[in-house]
């Protein structure tokens, strides 16, 4: 084995399989690298003893035997190990059972030795939980790695592991992939199971996956995760013959792609966001694809409202479940979380159902777009990664929050500037990613652009339902045409 960081997860598994290294040697290297970078990036919130597979190894062996791996500290439970969800309330509450995705990672032979940081309940596009402190971007430690899978992305970018578990409820795979110069795919709704405790997360808005340095790692790990269980609420389509990794050997064909940087949430995207999408368009055109400028195909102002309505209700449920599990009081949660939960409790059942029904209008509009265009191309984020603390609530707004929460004036909160402030905080720099979550469509962030200051900015491509294989084929083509593997952060 040469340098540990010179290989992706598929490559490391190959070295183990051919006897060129051992799982023990790889784990030593991963822990050594974690010790080197953790004082700088603060990506791992808990080191754990790797759990062992329960099932016998398949005839061909486990595909990722001996490869070091990290899971996200949100939903990806391992029995007996606390899943804090970025919250002080849950830091010491052990999980009752292992989640389906964590079990599939372990059964694939991955050596899970730690849990990565997430904002409290995954509710922000930055990873700065009060319980653990801010996670920092290896490309520039003054900036965020994004969120909510910011810990995973920072650890991969810093070379602790070649790929790490992530999840995506509003962009939480694609946002940190963009901020950290990685590849990230959010799969089609239902393709990756969520159980066993819950059949789906956020009514199907959220899904699990990975962030990785290579497209083939994401494809091969999707093969590990994809497919229903006995308790899955959906029977997924889009499973290709031979698996997703085999799709990378095929060309995507000539595609018609609609490009837009429009956003009702952020009417003035950063020039580097426009530069990123324009560079991607030029590359796609050079590869023979047709790229056409279009308007945003959905009413994204309404989409943002529908998304946040569901998000606030989910926050209320998350806080209530955490209080029941831990016995914690309201003060155990961050002020922003308490405000979101209060807004969720103040949402009527009628308003929530209307927001859920609103998804179908977005689906129909996006389906009409995909009848003409194979893919939608946008920036992944509207700005480069913000500085640490840049999205903290301003003092006067924080005081108003505190007063209203103390007065238990949840209903009043809905009619104050606080809501507009939270929309700006949560979605202002990431207005493009929620479209795939609400509609259940697959989307990926591809690392094709770096700012003059050296910060990565990805571009997003959104496909029709079940087009995960097409996205991966295109990603592999882009990776060959504009390789990013050798671009490493200075850390």
Image: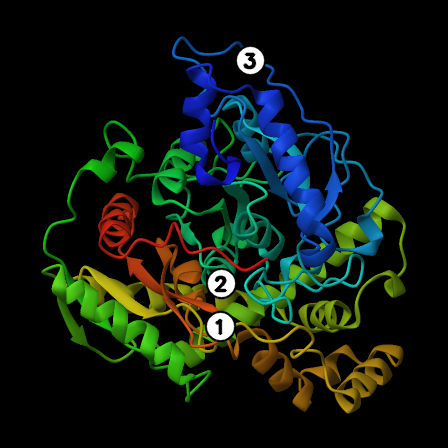
Which sits in the foreground, 455 or 318?
455
Q: Position of residue 418 (x, y in %)?
A: 68, 85
> Most extreme residue toward the front, as rendered?
2
Relative side of 298 to 418, left or right: left
Q: Secondary structure at mark 2?
A: helix
Q: Mark 1 and mark 2: span between their CA atoms?
A: 7 Å
Residue position for label 2: 175
Residue 243 lies in quadrant: top left
Residue at 66 percent of width and 90 percent of height: 417
How many C-alpha atoms fall within 10 Å of the one at disc 2: few (<14), some, or many (≥20)? many
Q: Secondary structure at mark 1?
A: loop
Using the rendered image of the protein, determine whether residue 372 is visible from the camera's viewpoint. Answer: no
Disc assigned to residue 55: 3
Residue 282 lies in quadrant: bottom left
Using the rendered image of the protein, determine whether residue 193 is visible from the camera's viewpoint. Answer: yes
Residue 447 lies in quadrant: bottom left
Relative side of 130 to 8, left or right: right
Q: Secondary structure at mark 3?
A: loop
Residue position for label 1: 430
Q: Are marks 1 and 2 in contact (CB under 8 Å)?
A: yes
Residue at 24 percent of width and 73 percent of height: 259
Q: How many marks?
A: 3
């Amino acid at each position: 084995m040469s340098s540990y960081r010179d290989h992706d997860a598929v490559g490391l598994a190959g070295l183990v399989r051919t006897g060129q290294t051992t799982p023990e040697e790889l784990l030593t290297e991963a822990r050594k690298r974690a010790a080197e970078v953790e004082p700088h990036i603060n990506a791992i919130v808990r080191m754990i003893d790797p759990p062992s597979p329960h099932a016998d190894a398949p005839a061909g062996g486990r595909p990722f035997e001996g490869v070091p791996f990290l899971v996200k500290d949100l939903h990806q439970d391992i029995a007996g190990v606390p899943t804090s969800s970025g919250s002080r309330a849950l830091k010491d509450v052990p999980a009752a059972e292992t989640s389906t995705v964590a079990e599939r990672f372990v059964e694939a032979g991955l050596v899970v030795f730690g849990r990565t940081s997430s904002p409290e309940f995954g509710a922000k596009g930055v990873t700065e939980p009060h319980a653990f402190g801010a996670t920092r971007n290896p490309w520039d430690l003054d900036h965020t790695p994004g969120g909510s899978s910011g810990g995973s992305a920072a650890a991969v970018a810093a070379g602790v592991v070649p790929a790490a578990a992530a999840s995506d409820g509003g962009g939480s795979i694609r946002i940190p992939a963009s901020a950290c110069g990685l590849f990230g795919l959010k799969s089609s709704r239902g393709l990756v199971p969520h159980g066993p405790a819950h059949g789906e997360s956020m009514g199907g808005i959220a899904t699990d996956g990975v962030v990785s340095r290579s497209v083939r790692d994401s494809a091969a790990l999707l093969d590990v995760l994809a497919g229903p269980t006995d308790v899955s609420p959906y029977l997924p389509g889009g499973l290709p013959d031979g698996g997703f990794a085999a799709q990378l050997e095929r060309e995507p064909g000539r595609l018609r792609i609609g490009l837009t940087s429009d956003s009702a949430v952020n009417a003035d995207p950063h020039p580097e966001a426009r530069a990123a999408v324009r560079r991607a368009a030029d590359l796609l055109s050079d590869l023979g694809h047709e790229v056409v400028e279009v308007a945003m195909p959905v009413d994204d102002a309404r989409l943002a409202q529908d998304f946040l309505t569901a998000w606030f209700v989910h926050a209320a449920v998350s806080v209530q479940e955490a209080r029941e599990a831990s016995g914690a009081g309201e003060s155990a949660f961050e002020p922003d979380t308490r405000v979101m939960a209060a807004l969720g409790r103040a949402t009527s059942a009628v308003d929530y159902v209307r927001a859920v029904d609103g998804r179908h209008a977005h689906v129909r509009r996006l389906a009409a777009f995909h009848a003409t265009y194979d893919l939608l191309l946008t920036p992944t984020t509207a700005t480069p990664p913000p500085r640490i603390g840049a999205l903290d609530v301003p003092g006067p707004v924080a005081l108003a929050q505190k007063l209203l929460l103390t007065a238990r004036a949840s209903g009043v909160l809905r009619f104050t500037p606080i809501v507009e402030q939270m929309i700006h905080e949560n979605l202002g720099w990431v207005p493009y990613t929620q479209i795939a979550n609400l509609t259940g469509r697959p989307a990926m962030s591809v690392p094709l652009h770096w700012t003059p200051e050296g910060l990565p900015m990805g571009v997003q491509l959104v496909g029709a339902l079940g087009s995960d294989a097409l996205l991966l084929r295109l990603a592999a083509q882009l990776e060959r045409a504009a390789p990013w593997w050798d671009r490493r952060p200075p850390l």
